[in-house]
Amino acid sequence: MSGTRRAAGPAVKKKPGKKPPRTRKQKTLRVLKWVGITGLVMALIAAAGFVFLYRSIDIPDPNKDFETQTTKVFYADGKDEIGSFAVQNREVIGIKEMPEDLQNAVVAAENRSFWTDKGLDPKGMLRAFLNNSTSETTQGASTITQQYVKILYLSQERTYKRKVKEAILSLKIQRSMSKTEILQAYLNTIYFGRGAYGVQAASEAYFAKDAKDLSLRESAVLASVINNPSKFDPANGKDSRAALKLRYEYVLDGMAEAGNITEDEAEKAAKRLPKLPEQEVESRYAGQKGHVLAMVRKELVRLGFDPDEIEGGGLRVTTTFTEKAMQAAEEGVKEARPEGLSDKELHVGVASVEPGTGAVRGIFGGQDYLQSQLNWAVSGGQAGSTLKPFALVAAIREGFSLKDTFDGNSPYILPDGGDVENQGNESFGSAVSMIKATEDSINTAFIDMTLGMENGPDKIIKAMNDMGLPGKEANQDLHGFPMATPGLEPVTGVALGSATVSPINMANAYATLAANGEAAQPYIIEKVTDADGEVRYRHKVDSRDAVEPDIAADVTYALQQVVENGSGYAAQELGRPAAGKTGTSTNSDGDVVSSWFSGFTPQLATSVVYVRGKGAEPLDGYLEPFFGGTYPAQTWTAVMKRDMEGLEIEEFPEPAYVDGEAPSPGHSPTTAPPKPTKTPKPSDTPSDTPTPSDTPTPSETPTESPTESPSSSCGLLGCETPTESPTPSDTATPSGGATRTPRPRGRRG
């Protein structure tokens, strides 16, 4: 039988052999393999993401504040600085103006791989990442390029999103700018403390010098403070100074390691910090500078400069002000001003103007600008008899002469039956010359003079306007500061001075006489250049022949007699030819509200006013004596002595005694010998301005931007013209006085 042979027992399946266990090495290789694969994938994803971000993130517009430069305001010499306007205190300079020691010190302090890295420090970034992830303290690893990018383009927030954007922008900046350009931009941008942005401002703030003049030690200090300006500013105490010393040594060591300086140089410099000048704790608006800067800002706006450019455009503004004239005004006021009266209550305004050009050379605005922004050199007060010289110009134009005579008796009966009195109701006779009327400030003679001309008040106002005294309404088109004479109305008493006048305008109008009749618009800015040195504005003198030279000479001669023989005798102390006029003014209640002296030499015209409170509070009973020939004249003399120091003594032209046909009869020169004159004592000072019953009470609060309202009440001698105008925050506007109808009495002068 055939068939397949069966095995002797059941079939047995073979089991596969066991693999030997993996070794540790094999396990490690396996893990590394998958880590490598995962890492490669992640790297590819990261690279793709980075490429995407690099292409999608554009360099943004710079943070505007960090592109600004400080606008600087200079005296007339164009060198000495008055002050500045700034968003951030910064002045951009070139890398050539930054010493090599400074450049090397900053690199040693902030980024020692700066010259070789690509704008990033990967090791430092990883180190900072690990530290910040495991510690409560934060650590930075930004390169100089990254710091520059963060400041100029990004915010200061501490987020990884911002850090990634910072890294990408740093790479882009690195490709678009050279290392030198990046360092220059960084040093013009970074904050050094003390309000200083950029190395030039920092050099001035810490060492009172230009960056180009910094020494090795000084450079190392500035490089040190970048890391933490508050912590390392030695002005903040012993701890800060000690911390600075350690940081300073670190910077010097880094410079030595880089081969920028020798070990010996580093060791020698590290022994001590450089001398740092005592820090001045002073606002740029403190004192009188604040008044000047406020005027300059207004004028720049009027000239068409954008406020943003004024604050941060790096303009260079050369003004008309001289340091000598500014000091003369401040020191002169301090010398002559009565002691014991608060500068919050008694205000003095001073202005000095150059004849022939209108350049405002010096002002004293009153109280420290930080205490009060009201500038009394602009606001002024009621003018009193300082307006009488304009009546002389008008009268001589009409045919009167210095020798013609006018009624000096008191009282003077007006056509409407009212009257005007001289101070103390003193009579000087029925025929006093124009010179005598001016010398003794005889009110009745000036009323007679005004009435002796057809439309006399209008002609006096025309003389004022011709000589530079503006009309009653503010004209911002002519000047950076408001130009107006509130209360200037064509009334019989116009020359007696109820109008409110700015000392700047008054000095400028008197300067017309000093310039032999040539008038000019007052101005305060000579030139403006931009950050690139391009001239953006240059002033052209706006002058004109306003008064015939012979008439100017005659009026000047009459005003010289005020100094030589009359109420302005205090100005004799100047010791050189001077002409001027005193003035006081009263309100409708008979209270003295202002006291003046305005005068000039051939080289300079200066006007001084004393007022109280908000500009209309009584001086009598408070300031004694209150006559213009006392404190105002003494202040004028103290100011002008300083102004005239070092200048040649110049003479005024001789009087021409211009003589035309008198416009009205009864004014022929007297043949009687003139009354002997004497140098009066303060108590003898004659009347300057009467208080007529129907003379207006002008705005009692001088303002920097007056706006006239329609006249509410007018009489033969004046109108009450209330003035509504913005008032500085530290003053209130009082109500105007009421018009009275009783007989007018004499104003005191």
Image (cartoon, helix red, strand yellow):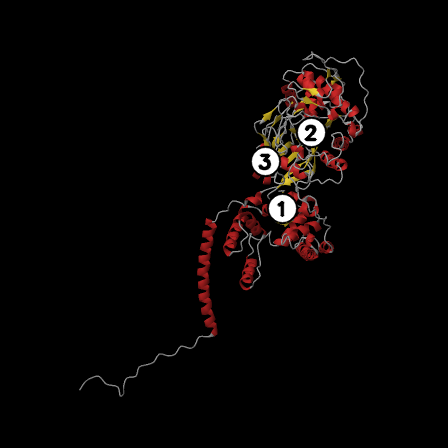
Q: Alpha-carbon distance for marks 3 and 2?
A: 23 Å
Residue type at mark 3 is Pro
Q: Quadrant of the C terminus?
A: top right
The structure residue drawn at horizontal position 59% and vertical position 35%, both measured from the top left corner, is 726
Please state which of the two labelled residues, at mark 3 or mark 1, is closer to the viewer. Answer: 3
Q: Quadrant of residue 351?
A: top right
Q: Amino acid at mark 1?
A: Gly
Between disc 3 and disc 2, the foreground one is 2
Q: Is residue 742 left or right of residue 653?
A: left
Q: Amino acid at mark 2?
A: Ser
Kindly tell me whether residue 512 is visible in this rendering. no
* Label 3 to label 1: alpha-carbon separation: 40 Å
Mark 2, other Cα within 10 Å: few <14 / some 14–19 / many ≥20: many
Label 2 vs label 1, nearer the camera: 2
Category of crowding for the residue at label 3, using alpha-carbon neighbours closer than 10 angstroms: few (below 14), some (14–19), many (at least 20):
some
Residue ID for mark 3:
726
- The residue at which mark 1 appears reads as 198
Q: Which residue is mark 2?
A: 585
Vertical placement of residue 86 versus 146, above or below: above
Disc 2/disc 1 C-alpha distance (Å): 54 Å
Residue nearest the viewer, comparing 418 with 724: 418
